[in-house]
Amino acid sequence: MRPEMLTALSALAVALVTAAGGVVTAVIGRRQPRRPRGAERRDDFTAVTEKLGEHIARLEREAEQDRQQAEQDRQQAEEDRARISAQDFALRYIAGWARSLVAYMRQAQLEPPPPPQPIPDEVRPYLHDIGS
């Protein structure tokens, strides 16, 4: 064999391998869509960003609900303080009135009747002058 023939045959072999590689690449290329480098990372970033956005929106809704609940609790506490203050005033008024009646009866030399039932232990510190 002459060297020109050997060169021609090796060139033919390289051409056949290159053509076969091109065909294989074309077939495989049709099956898988071509994606640019880093596309998966961008898709992951987009998915993570969307999930974080949803999470942030949920946290903002929960924070707003907590603020509304705190405001309702504050208003309820103010109403409770006002009610307790009014009840305290009413009890003080009734206790003062009862003391004045007892004082009037003793001044008239009458003995006030004993309480209709024993005084509960929870009430005794607040009605310290009963029985004196």
Image: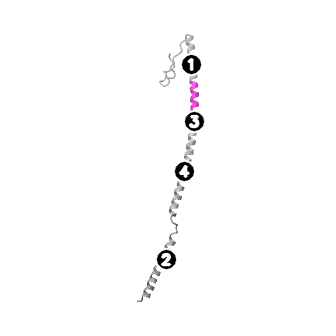
Q: Which residue is mark 1?
A: 98
Dot 3 or dot 4: first in sequence order is 4
| Classed neighbour count for the residue bearing mark 3: other residues with Cα under 10 Å, few (<14), some (14–19), many (≥20) | few
Given this view, does label 2 or label 1 mark the residue nearer the observer?
2
At a point 57% along the width and 31% down the height, the residue shown is 81
Q: Which residue is mark 4?
A: 56
Dot 1 or dot 3: first in sequence order is 3
Query: Is residue 29 positioned above or below 112 on the image?
Result: below
* C-alpha separation, residue under disc 3 versus residue under disc 4: 30 Å
**In terms of secondary structure, where does tag 4 sit?**
helix
Dot 4 or dot 2: first in sequence order is 2
Q: Position of residue 58 (x, y in %)?
A: 54, 49
Given this view, does label 1 or label 3 mark the residue nearer the observer?
3
Q: Position of residue 24 (x, y in %)?
A: 48, 75
The N terminus appears in which quarter of the rendering?
bottom left
**In terms of secondary structure, where does tag 1 sit?**
helix
Residue found farthest to the bottom: 1
Q: Which mark is residue 76?
A: 3
